[in-house]
């Protein structure tokens, strides 16, 4: 998508320097900073520190990390070591595991001398596939938005609410939850987006930055505002992303998503989840009981980062010294609260039968 009129992906391969370029998302929305990532340690740090974040982007980044590790040492031991180190960076988003397994199983049978080139090709393939998947999610989701628009007085915007950043920054391009919004807007459907701030890390600010760059009308709201907006008929549809969805349709996403789903259910507001197929965990049936929820550092809760009056980016403490905090980063919305899953193959019910009908080959495996 575009930044000041120039098209960017959230990562790209620099052929001259032979490094991966990423956008440091810790600095956004205030500073647009591109960084090279070259060594395995750099990749591990980039994911752990959330310079890159969002389930599909973490997966694609890890594939490049494995590829660059293979350039230095392509032995079986080095492959296992890189796989383990990258796999341990973040526990919840299943795309990380999916991408690493895909790379490892393709590389293991190859002679070590052929691994580095094959791994880089595979990383490019995973990145390109992500873009294609998200584009198709956008086409299916935009049809839902058009349908809502057709039932409103002409010119009245469709009001969408989204949580966290499931935008192009969280993927390689387009985003998942935002792809339908971008495509509806580009097709001339009037839209307006309520953007949840998404404490503690305020990924909503990334969404606001993206939407603003694309000229999409939006309003930034505190996380607690969604229920009120829904009670007053100001939300036509909720659309979020997901970090892992079970084969039974339970949706794990950024902390606070579950509360939005409950409010949507209580108010008869459709709650859709944009779901690329690599985010489906076919091994898991019970999301609430089974998915490991990442517990992050307490300073994300006790402190906030923002731009100070002098223009410098600063971090300030909001709680009393020594306050005990907990910081679960994700929650699980049971499939029964989800109106539908928007995948690259179409929209289905958030149930085992719904997903199996769209992905019969995966469900059978
Ligand atoms: O902790 P983050 O910022 O990596 O969490 C991201 C989310 O929860 C997104 O909603 C999810 O990855 C879907 S991204 C297309």
Image: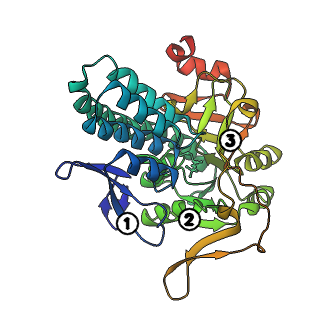
Q: Nearer the viewer, mark 2 or mark 3?
A: 3
The residues bearing labels 1 and 2 have C-alpha atoms spaced at a distance of 16 Å
Q: Report the residue at 69% width, 60% height from top.
A: 298
Q: Is residue 163 left or right of residue 45?
A: right
Q: Position of residue 267 (x, y in %)?
A: 80, 48
Q: Is residue 364 left or right of residue 236?
A: left
Q: Position of residue 41 (x, y in %)?
A: 40, 48
Q: Which residue is mark 3?
A: 293
Q: Residue furthest top?
A: 364
Q: Nearer the viewer, residue 17 or 163?
A: 17
Q: Tell me, for residue 42, which label it has, or none.
A: none
| Cβ–Cβ under 8 Å for marks 2 and 3 | no
Mark 1 is surrounded, within 10 Å at the Cα level, by few (under 14), some (14 to 19) or many (20 or more) other residues, namely few
| Marked residue nearer the N-terminal end (1 or 2) | 1
The residues bearing labels 2 and 3 have C-alpha atoms spaced at a distance of 23 Å
The residues bearing labels 3 and 1 have C-alpha atoms spaced at a distance of 29 Å
Q: Position of residue 140 (x, y in %)?
A: 50, 37
Q: Nearer the viewer, residue 131 or 16?
A: 16
Secondary structure, mark 3, is loop
Q: Report the residue at 28% width, 34% height from top.
A: 73
Q: Tell me, for residue 205, which label it has, or none.
A: 2
| Cβ–Cβ under 8 Å for marks 1 and 2 | no
Q: Which residue is mark 1?
A: 33
Callout 1: CB less than 8 Å from ligand 1: no
Q: Is residue 276 visible?
A: no
């Amino acid at each position: 998508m575009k930044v000041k009129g120039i098209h960017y992906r959230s990562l790209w391969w620099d052929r001259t320097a032979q490094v991966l370029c990423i956008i440091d998302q810790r600095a956004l929305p205030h500073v647009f900073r591109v960084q090279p990532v070259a060594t395995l340690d750099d990749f591990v740090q980039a994911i752990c520190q959330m310079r890159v974040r969002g389930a599909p982007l973490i997966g694609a980044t890890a594939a490049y990390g494995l590829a660059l590790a293979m350039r230095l040492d392509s032995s079986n031991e080095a492959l296992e070591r890189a796989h383990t180190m990258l796999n341990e960076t973040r526990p919840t988003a299943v795309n990380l595991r999916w991408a690493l397994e895909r790379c490892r199983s393709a590389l293991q049978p190859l002679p070590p001398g052929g691994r580095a080139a094959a791994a880089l090709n595979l990383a490019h393939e995973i990145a390109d596939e992500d873009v294609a998947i998200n584009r198709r999610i956008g086409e299916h989701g935009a049809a839902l938005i058009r349908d809502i628009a057709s039932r409103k007085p002409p010119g009245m915007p469709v009001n969408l609410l989204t949580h966290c950043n499931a935008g192009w920054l969280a993927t390689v391009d387009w985003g998942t939850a935002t792809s339908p919004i971008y495509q509806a807007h580009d097709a001339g459907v009037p839209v307006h987006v309520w953007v949840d701030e998404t404490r503690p890390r305020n990924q909503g600010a990334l969404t606001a930055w993206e939407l603003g760059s694309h000229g999409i009308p939006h309003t930034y709201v505190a996380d607690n505002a969604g229920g009120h907006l829904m009670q007053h008929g100001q939300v036509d549809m909720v659309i979020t992303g997901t970090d892992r969805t079970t084969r039974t349709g339970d949706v794990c996403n950024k902390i606070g998503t579950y509360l939005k789903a409950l409010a949507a259910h209580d108010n008869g507001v459709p709650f859709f989840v944009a779901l690329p197929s690599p985010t489906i965990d076919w091994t898991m049936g019970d999301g609430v009981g089974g998915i490991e929820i990442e517990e992050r550092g307490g300073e994300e809760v006790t402190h906030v980062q923002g731009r100070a009056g002098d223009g410098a980016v600063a971090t300030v403490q909001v709680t009393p010294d020594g306050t005990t905090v907990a910081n679960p980063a994700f929650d699980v919305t049971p499939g029964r609260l989800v109106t539908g899953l928007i995948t690259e193959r179409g929209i289905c019910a958030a149930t085992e039968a719904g997903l199996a009908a769209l992905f019969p080959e995966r469900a059978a495996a």
